Image: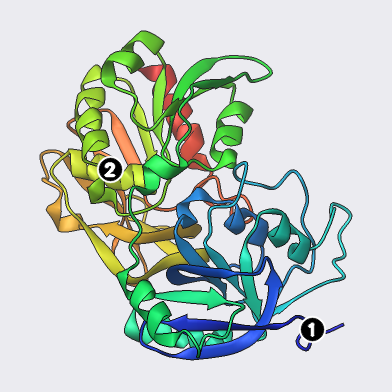
Amino acid sequence: MSLFNMGEKAYLMLADGQVFEGRSFGAKGTVIGEVVFTTGVTGYQETLTDPSYYGQIVTQTFPLIGNYGVNSEDNESARSYVNGYIVREWCNSPSNFRSEGNINDFLKEHNIVGINNIDTRRLTRTIREVGVMNGVITTEDVYAKRDELLEKVRAFTVKDAVKAVTNTETRTYEPGEKKLRVALFDFGYKRNIRQELLKRGCEVVVVPAYTTAGEIKELAPDGIMFSNGPGDPAENVEIIGNIREIQKLGIPIFGICLGHQLMALANGGKTEKLKYGHRGANQPVIDLESGLTYVTSQNHGYAVVGDSIDPSVGRVSHINANDKTCEGIRYTSVNARTVQFHPEAHGGPLDTSYLFDEFVKTMQNA
């Protein structure tokens, strides 16, 4: 059953003044954010609960979303951090043995304003050609408030993103059989990073984003994980300073996504904002050491400038096959390696999960 003609009218207006008319689903209201797109065919629930999307309005390029429903097990965090949600069509009759409800009710439960029945292909082409831009979804008459809304949209910026998503308390998760202890920095971490470590016998101590080197030393972990997270990596000046001291402890470090970027900044590297980012489960990455190409899951709008890494500090280990941007760094000055993509990839490819095994071996041999 098509939902194209159901729901009250809703509007998406971009910062350049373009208006897309569609239908409301999920919560009602007005939300402003950075409009991005993700190409994932599956994993929409993981997308909606990934803290890395903080401050963003997410567009799904796949035309039908919600066909296998939602459940209580696949959330990557306790709540949703997206500002809004855009799909071509949503399914009100999901079919899957794990399904516990539909995506419309899920959005309402998490107070996410959504819009469907718009031309997501046209929207995606606009973002690809012009670049990521701000926008507003509203169930009010956008034309009556056009000038007022445009002013707010153009003034919007994503600020203090890590501070907004990190937990302020340390939490410990025990595996069935404990072999190692890992301090997982919560920059907005995805639950499946924790799960991959637990599966490998690691006690996972999730620590707040602003945890210092002194506090890590007292914790005495076998390894340190710098997680994914949202926002501009360069704005996290305090965290970058902490990482400079933490890496001196000599404890093996593994960084993912934002953790990869922050580690590079702590070691004199630079980051840049990409035109429209890498978001989806089909990003090809070349391992420069083996020559193999892997299909990876990614979600980021910034990238490390590969040439900014001092050869005496580290070397680029992976690049994106499409645009040749830096996708990984193996450090030589400290015991660390980082990747831009997501090797935990819940709702995505498992090609690079071996990196967790390598991290475990590094801890065991340290």
Residue wearing tag 2 = 262
Secondary structure at badge 1 equals: loop
Q: Are marks 2 and 1 in contact (CB under 8 Å)?
A: no
Along the viewing direction, whichever of 18 and 67 lies nearer the viewer: 18
Residue type, label 2 = Leu
Secondary structure at badge 2 equals: helix
x 20%, y 44%: residue: 265
Residue 222, how many percent across, how many down?
Answer: 41, 17
Crowding at dot 2, Cα within 10 Å, few <14 / some 14-19 / many 20+, comes out as: many
Among numbered discs 2 and 1, the one appearing first in the sequence: 1
Residue type, label 1 = Met
Query: Is residue 324 in view from this perspective?
Result: no
x 33%, y 29%: residue: 210
x 49%, y 85%: residue: 123
Q: Is residue 140 left or right of residue 15?
A: right
Q: From what the image shows, is residue 318 above or below residue 5?
A: above
x 65%, y 62%: residue: 44
Q: From what the image shows, is residue 115 above or below residue 336?
A: below
Residue 118, how many percent across, how many down?
Answer: 61, 87
Numbered label tally: 2
Along the viewing direction, whichever of 366 and 34 lies nearer the viewer: 34
Query: In the rendered view of the protein, which quadrant contains the C terminus?
Result: top left
Crowding at dot 1, Cα within 10 Å, few <14 / some 14-19 / many 20+, comes out as: few
C-alpha span from label 2 to label 1: 45 Å
Q: Which disc number belongs to residue 6? A: 1
